[in-house]
Image (cartoon, rainbow, N blue to C red):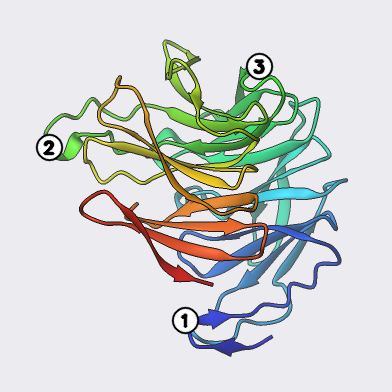
Amino acid sequence: MGSQGGEQMLESGHQDVVHDVAVDYYGKRLATCSSDRLVKVFALGASGSTPPSSALATLSGHEGPIWQVAWAHPKFGNILASCSYDRKVIIWREGAENEWHQAQVFQEHESSVNSISWAPEVFGLCLACGSADGTISVLSLKADGSWEKAKIEQAHPVGVTSVSWAPATAPGSLIGVDPGAVQKLASGGCDNTVKVWKFMNGSWKLDCFPPLSKHVDWVRDVAWAPNLGLPRSTIASASQDGTVVIWTQAKDGDQWQPLTLNDFKTPVWRVSWSLTGNILAVSDSSNKVTLWKEEVDGEWNQVSNV
């Protein structure tokens, strides 16, 4: 463990492959998850300082590899969600400092739960879960403390690999067209497609016809870009085929237009946007992370390589 320049190295203490890391809202803590069936929570030091080598907390409860962890918005308290090959989604809540307990365990799926994503906080405590059984479940905490469970059946019949919420800021609200916050989701799957879903009249409906097809192998990850009120919506998708595609929709109801960001010549695992939505981080199977920036002419250029 050490620190050099702006990089921090963290010895996780996991006994197997680490599948995901997630930083909390304030950038103060880091959660990790692994095939060793554990979630760990670490403190993050100030930029450039070396973080502690031992976890603040180790959370056990899953019975299989844990694929993803996600922090809820802090307005709901200190809450983490995790999803696993064991078909379970666990909501963890911190009571006393560094003392976590299982607040809720969901077993809504018949196969591995591959991806989880918290909705923007304006929609309350609401979690989308994508599963290898082909369905997406949406779990929402109600005022009486119970959870409402909705399901998108056969979202990607061969399996859902990734889910990502649209930002709460409605496209176009900056220029005076504000239809109010609408619940939308993007999903990727083993059918090589990206799909967009919209919550309308009490149920989830497909909001893109046909599904977004540009990849020729599994879509490994989707990430909806933050929207600062401009008319355009943007989604990035990463695929087993080695490409990352940037999908843009000029305004609600228009067709989504694809642009291939790059062919990385190796499977691409994850894509993640900056808070302003103009820089995209891409991680691929050759252990590289690259940063890409959109220029004013609409071209994307690589700006960094880790």
Crowding at dot 2, Cα within 10 Å, few <14 / some 14-19 / many 20+, comes out as few
- Given the image, on which type of amino acid does mark 2 rest? Ile
- Given the image, on which type of amino acid does mark 3 rest? Gln
Residue at image point 80% right, 29% down: 111
Picture layout, residue 16 above or below residue 157: below
Query: Mark 3 or 1, which is nearer the eye?
Result: 3
Q: Do the CB atoms of the residues marked 3 and 1 lie less than 8 Å apart?
A: no
Q: Residue 148's x, y, as percent?
A: 59, 23
Answer with left or right where residue 136 lies relative to residue 271.
Answer: right
Q: Residue 77's x, y, as percent?
A: 53, 52
Q: Which residue is mark 1?
A: 47
Q: Which residue is mark 3?
A: 154
The earlier-in-sequence mark between 3 and 2 is 3
Residue at the top extreme of this rendering: 201
Answer with left or right where residue 176 lies relative to residue 298.
Answer: left
Residue at image point 40% right, 57% down: 274
Which of the pair 67/266 is nearer the observer? 266
Q: On the image, which quarter does residue 260 sit in?
A: top left
Q: Is residue 145 visible?
A: no
Q: Residue 85's x, y, as percent?
A: 81, 41
Q: Is residue 193 visible?
A: yes
Q: Which residue is mark 2?
A: 175
Q: Do the CB atoms of the residues marked 3 and 2 lie less than 8 Å apart?
A: no
Disc 1 is placed on an element classified as: loop
